[in-house]
């Protein structure tokens, strides 16, 4: 692993950088400051703004003080007063102050790389965080250490990747551009302090700079032989079969509901609780039990063949008598079906076509999100992590193959491809009960895809729903 450099790199929008530089020259702060702290605050905002609909980012005073020192409040006020960032003045008790950029125009699709000295307050914070990650890694199991070491050994051609990004920036949103640019820069040579490898405590996933990076740019990993990505097609819908299979076994008394173990549920106590509550609810109505059997068979057919999103596309096109829906829109709809709150007003209409086709599976989705709408997502992510990290990656490492892991997929060298695919298929068969479709792709062949916003698709579905209801009324009148 490369030793620490005296500096690391971050990127902030050029328009923000130039405005800050000009203000410091003409109207310098009247308090002690480090310029790197101003860069860091702007970076804090742009790196998190995609997580918020209004792009206003809550900034914790505790973290800000640790990062930038005692004058962090003065630094924030200076940036606001000089119109480099904006503040949401709607204060809520026990809530962090929210900040955003002053201008969300196309001008933000131009970035400036700035160097952060490790001797500054911000530099020390990042270095200490990286040191803590290294210390924690020493106590991890051997297979996790091997995955981590492999990640830090990876070389990446950030310069070529950033050039590619700039050539395509007109096809992506501002927030997508900024997020991708940051990922690419974090992976650049000599920027070890900005790399990150950690196991998420909520869902047990391994998060790295690669897991958030748009798939197309992974082809800029430098390797002495071709790299291939093995990707579980329709991964979350496929893994949901495990949940459906367990429910089916419980309601058919193949598993004792009072003796179901956390081992059976992938060590996941939340999954165990949800299975018991859901199964009890379904068993109150034997008609539901019969319908569920048929729905599971159909669901299993499409997910096992890797055609779930195409099926979902057809379900919606038939329901709304349109050809608007395609595979990418169907993926977005699945996210709304599976992960949005039962009380979501944005996605209520989106769920009706699926509910019409799969009423009992829809009911199961609602059961699993009854208390906390994130429960289902976390359950599936924990199952995914258990399969891909604790089983597939572990088995690969035992066979001398150390992959790059990206949640529901792995990247391996061409010489390891056949053995990797064999191990992956065997593990998935043992867990799901069938061998699902694995997409094998040479990283150099990956295509640049434009991601659509789920809320835009939801808005279109709302319009189609109104049109469908009007047509039904017209038919009733003419009938």
Image: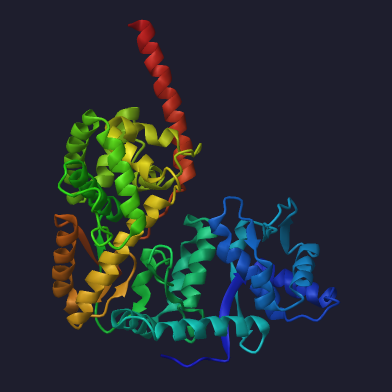
Residue 314 position, x and y percent, is: 27, 37
Left or right of 464, for residue 61: right
Left or right of 106, for residue 209: left
Residue visible at 18% across and 46% down in the picture: 249
Q: Using the rendered view, name the quadrant where residue 353 is placed.
A: top left
The residue nearer to you, when weighing 428 against 246, is: 246
Q: Quadrant of the N terminus?
A: bottom left
Q: Quadrant of the C terminus?
A: top left
Give the answer, above or below, for where 452 lies relative to 14.
above
Q: What scheme was used to colour the molecule?
A: rainbow
Residue 377 position, x and y percent, is: 38, 53
User: Does any portion of residue 244 appear in the rendered image?
Assistant: yes
Residue visible at 22% across and 36% down in the picture: 292
Residue 175 position, x and y percent, is: 54, 59
Q: Using the rendered view, name the quadrant where residue 260 is placed.
A: bottom left
User: Does any portion of residue 191 appear in the rendered image?
Assistant: no
Tally of numbered tags = 0
Residue visible at 37% across and 16% down in the picture: 472
Residue 375 position, x and y percent, is: 40, 52
The residue nearer to you, when weighing 446 against 10, is: 10
The residue nearer to you, when weighing 4 against 300, is: 300
Q: Using the rendered view, name the quadrant where residue 9 is placed.
A: bottom right
């Amino acid at each position: 692993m490369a030793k620490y450099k005296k500096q690391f790199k971050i990127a902030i929008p050029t328009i923000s950088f130039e405005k800050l530089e000009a203000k410091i020259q003409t109207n310098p702060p009247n308090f002690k400051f480090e310029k790197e702290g101003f860069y860091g605050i702007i970076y804090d905002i742009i790196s998190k703004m995609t997580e918020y609909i209004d792009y206003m980012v809550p900034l914790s005073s505790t973290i800000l003080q640790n990062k930038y020192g005692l004058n962090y409040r003065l630094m924030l006020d200076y940036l606001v007063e000089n119109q480099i960032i904006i503040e949401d003045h709607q204060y809520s008790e026990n809530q962090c102050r929210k900040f955003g950029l002053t201008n969300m125009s196309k001008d933000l699709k131009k970035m400036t790389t700035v160097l952060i000295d490790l001797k500054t307050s911000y530099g020390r914070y990042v270095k200490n965080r990286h040191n803590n990650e290294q210390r924690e890694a020493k106590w991890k199991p051997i297979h996790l250490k091997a995955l981590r070491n492999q990640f830090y050994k990876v070389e990446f051609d950030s310069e070529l990747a950033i050039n590619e990004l700039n050539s395509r920036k007109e096809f992506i949103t501002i927030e997508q551009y900024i997020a991708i640019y940051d990922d690419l820069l974090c992976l650049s040579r000599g920027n070890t302090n900005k790399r990150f490898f950690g196991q998420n405590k909520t869902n047990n996933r391994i998060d790295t700079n690669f897991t958030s990076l748009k798939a197309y740019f992974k082809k800029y990993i430098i390797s002495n032989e071709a790299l291939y990505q093995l990707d579980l097609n329709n991964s979350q819908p496929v893994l949901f079969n495990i949940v459906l299979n367990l429910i089916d076994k419980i309601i058919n008394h193949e598993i004792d509901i009072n003796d179901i173990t956390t081992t059976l549920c992938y060590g996941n106590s939340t999954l165990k609780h949800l299975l018991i509550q859901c199964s009890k609810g379904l068993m109150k109505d034997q008609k539901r039990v019969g319908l569920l059997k048929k729905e599971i068979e159909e669901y299993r057919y499409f997910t096992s063949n890797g055609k779930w999103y195409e099926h979902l596309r057809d379900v919606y096109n038939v329901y709304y008598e349109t050809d608007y829906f395609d595979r990418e829109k169907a993926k977005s709809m699945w996210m709304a079906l599976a992960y949005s709150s039962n009380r979501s007003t944005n996605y209520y209409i989106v769920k009706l076509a699926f509910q019409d086709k799969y009423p009992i599976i829809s009911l199961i989705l609602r059961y699993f999100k009854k208390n906390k709408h994130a429960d289902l997502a976390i359950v599936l992510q924990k199952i995914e992590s258990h399969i891909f990290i604790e089983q597939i990656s572990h088995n690969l490492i035992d066979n001398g193959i150390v992959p790059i892991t990206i949640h529901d997929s792995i990247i391996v060298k061409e010489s390891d491809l056949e053995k990797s695919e064999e191990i992956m298929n065997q593990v998935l068969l043992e867990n799901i009960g069938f061998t699902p479709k694995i997409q094998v792709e040479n990283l150099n062949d990956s295509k640049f895809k434009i991601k659509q916003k789920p809320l835009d698709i939801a808005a279109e579905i709302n319009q189609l729903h109104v049109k469908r209801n009007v047509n039904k009324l017209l038919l009733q009148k003419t009938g």
